[in-house]
Image (cartoon, grey):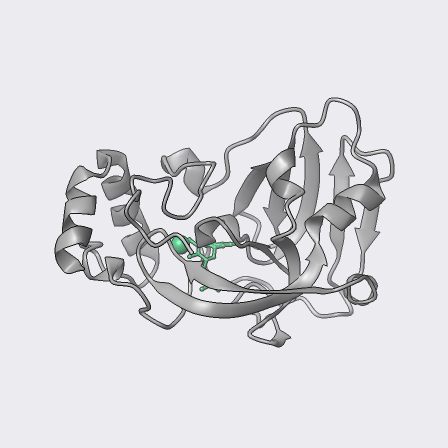
């Protein structure tokens, strides 16, 4: 496995190496990116592009849906909890290599929130903002409407903890975990895709696991 992984890194774009060095500066990870390519490292690593992130509770958490929509909305945590909940069990895969198999996430389908808001004419993409004040992400409208994309309220069958991006994080099951924006606070329908935080440093916007970021040989389930 290590041999294969090393080949993958050698063949990978130089830009990914740059991004990996950037990542290593802000979070604990394997700076070579080699050992991380082994599957099932089994545990999550904490990532945040900012220092202290404010804590939000049911009392002050809000999720806004705006931009090119017919009915802009602002949800409290209780309102999100009252909507139909979907549970997905899937492997979590960070692009730097660590992987946590069969992790349950539960929450509201992003598609349901988009439907409720009424996607307006000219919208082709969704942009996500976070209450850490820095992180952003994006999906095409088609990706955002997939059944395996959740506005997650639970992770590992418990409310999403603050460190994991609670009370509400995005969960994009088929893509590398950087798509799953933590501390989600805003969903904005936009006329075109706006690159997210790491995408401005060269990561792929279409971040399908195993089929992007020079990791064509990565596990795909
Ligand atoms: N707001 C925010 N969301 C984020 C990040 C971040 O730095 N800030 N990092 C991303 C990356 S690169 C990963 S691997 C996962 C890490 O999630 P975890 O801290 O729950 O393990 O969150 C993603 N979402
Ligand atoms: Mo990541």
Looking at the picture, how far across and down is residue 43, in whole percent? 38, 72
- Whether residue 110 is visible: yes
Query: How many marks do you count on the picture?
Result: 0
Q: Residue furthest front?
A: 221
Instruction: Pick the residue in front: 118 or 184.
Output: 118
- Identify the residue at horizontal 28%, vertical 47% (top origin): 217
Q: Residue furthest left?
A: 3
Q: Quadrant of the N terminus?
A: bottom left
The reply, left or right, for residue 58 in relation to residue 210 is right
- Whether residue 45 is visible: no
Q: Residue furthest bottom?
A: 158
The reply, left or right, for residue 220 in relation to residue 146 is left
Instruction: Pick the residue in front: 43 or 50.
Output: 43
Quadrant position of residue 19:
top left
The reply, left or right, for residue 134 in relation to residue 42 is right
- Identify the residue at horizontal 76%, vertical 43% (top origin): 114
Ligand 2 quadrant in view: bottom left
Looking at the picture, how far across and down is residue 90, in whole percent? 50, 63
- Identify the residue at horizontal 41%, vertical 36% (top origin): 204
In the rendered view, would you say 85 is above or below 3? below
The reply, left or right, for residue 161 in relation to residue 119 is left
In the rendered view, would you say 8 is above or below 160? above
Looking at the picture, how far across and down is residue 74, in whole percent? 81, 51
Q: Residue furthest top?
A: 122
Looking at the picture, how far across and down is residue 78, in whole percent? 81, 67
- Identify the residue at horizontal 42%, vertical 56% (top origin): 221
């Amino acid at each position: 496995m290590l041999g294969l992984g090393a080949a993958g890194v050698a063949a990978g774009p130089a830009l990914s190496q740059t991004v990996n060095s950037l990542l290593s500066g802000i979070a604990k990870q394997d700076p070579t990116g080699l050992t991380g390519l082994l599957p099932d490292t089994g545990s999550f690593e904490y990532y945040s592009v900012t220092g202290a992130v404010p804590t939000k509770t049911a009392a002050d958490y809000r999720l806004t849906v705006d931009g090119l929509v017919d009915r802009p909305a602002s949800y409290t945590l209780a309102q999100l909890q009252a909507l139909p909940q979907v549970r997905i069990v899937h492997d979590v895969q960070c692009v730097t290599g660590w992987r946590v198999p069969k992790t349950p996430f539960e929450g509201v389908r992003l598609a349901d929130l988009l439907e409720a808001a009424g996607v307006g004419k000219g919208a082709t993409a969704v942009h996500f903002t976070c209450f850490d004040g820095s992180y952003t992400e994006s999906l095409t409208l088609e990706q955002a409407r997939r059944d395996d994309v959740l506005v997650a309220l639970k992770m590992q069958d418990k409310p999403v903890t603050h460190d994991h991006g609670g009370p509400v994080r995005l969960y994009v099951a088929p893509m590398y975990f950087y798509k799953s924006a933590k501390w989600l606070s805003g969903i904005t329908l936009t006329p075109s895709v706006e690159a997210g935080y790491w995408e401005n440093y060269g990561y792929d916007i279409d971040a399908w696991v195993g089929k992007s970021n020079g990791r064509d040989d990565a596990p795909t389930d």
